[in-house]
Image (spheres, grey):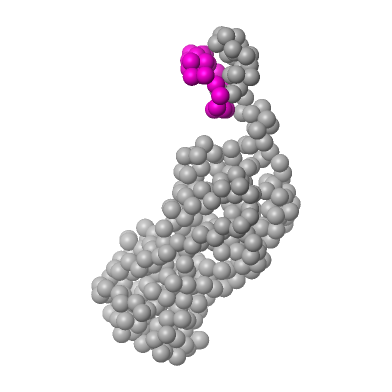
Amino acid sequence: MTLEEVAKLAGVSSATVSRVINNYPHVRNNVRQRVLEVIEETGYQPNIAARSLASNRTNVIGLVIPNSVSNFFTDPYFPRLTEGISHTCNENDYVLSLFIFNSQEIERKLFPRVTRPGLVDGIIIQSTGLNDETISYVIEGNIPFIVAGRPMNTPLASFVDVDNVSGAYKATSHLIQLGRKRIATITGALDTSVGIDRLQGYRQAINNHAFAIDEALIEEGNFTELGSYYATKRLLPLNPDAIFVASDTMAIGVMRALREENISVPKDIAIVGFDDLPPAINAVPPLTTVRQPIYRFGFKLVETLLDVIKNGPEPPRRIIFETELVIRESCGMRSPVVS
């Protein structure tokens, strides 16, 4: 069945059928209804490739995961984020295409194909930190894009993020309110904006509550469970009585290390994580954590990218979500008083 055959059966021109398919106005209701009835009766399917060429739209959005995001398949944060992105794409009649690069060399070689005309309408990029080469590739390709997370070296880029500084401040302040004196932190990767911002929130809380910052109580965990496990082993000789951990995944590594040393949580060391993912609820004891709206984050990425596609990149969109401290047993059950 072709468009011309549908037009013949409906007794209209091919142009009219095209206008009905593309939901254009200025088609009489009785004509529109007659064309739609023929389409339903015949099972006609428009030629997607031809429609894309005619409209300059593919109805495909690309999610680009740079090679430096090595924990995409192991950190439960990313499946939840991708679920929100994919669902919102589908609600807007878009298809999500995932692009993952295994090395910097492959990324440099293949990325120009991602940005060539006719492949995707826009791109969501997972921010990687200080060297956001991926963003520069997209800018060179002149394709609409948005960044998941605050980009560090591209001030004019649109992005969606959470208030990581405020979230870390709440977590650390809660531990202080509970009477903990030697509060350590295990950071994320410190060449990323999220790692830097959560460390900044920790430092602000310590300073604002008149504590001296002990640099020895700051360890980098690289957002991995194994990284935080070894970071905990390095911290234990310094006798911390609390640890703010910059992700739930890392907090699980911390609790594993403490169990091996027969250290009680929260009696001996209180723990607060960040994300509020399923591992936080299922941890023993359940993990106090900073909740970020990951699914809504994915929704907003797509919604904002569609706005960029429609209206252009200027002015840059900068959307920042607030976080919420969720109290569970890993630090005690007192309500927070954050100041």
Where are the magenta residues, as a range?
A: 21-45
Q: In this view, does 226 lie above or below 20?
A: below
Compare residues 8 and 40 and report the one nearer the observer: 8
Compare residues 79 and 231 and report the one nearer the observer: 79
Residue 252 appears in the figure: no
Compare residues 91 and 13 and report the one nearer the observer: 13
Residue 87: where, in percent of width, then height? 46, 43
Residue 271 relative to residue 76: left or right: left
Residue 327: where, in percent of width, then height? 30, 69
**Residue 269 inside the magenta-drawn segment:** no
**Residue 39 inside the magenta-drawn segment:** yes
For this orientation, the residue located farthest to the left is 334
Q: Which residue is drawn at 50% across and 77% down?
A: 200
Helix, strand or loop: magenta stretch: helix
Compare residues 155 and 101 and report the one nearer the observer: 155
For the C terminus, give its image quadrant.
bottom left
Residue 190 sits in which quadrant?
bottom right
Residue 55: where, in percent of width, then height? 65, 33
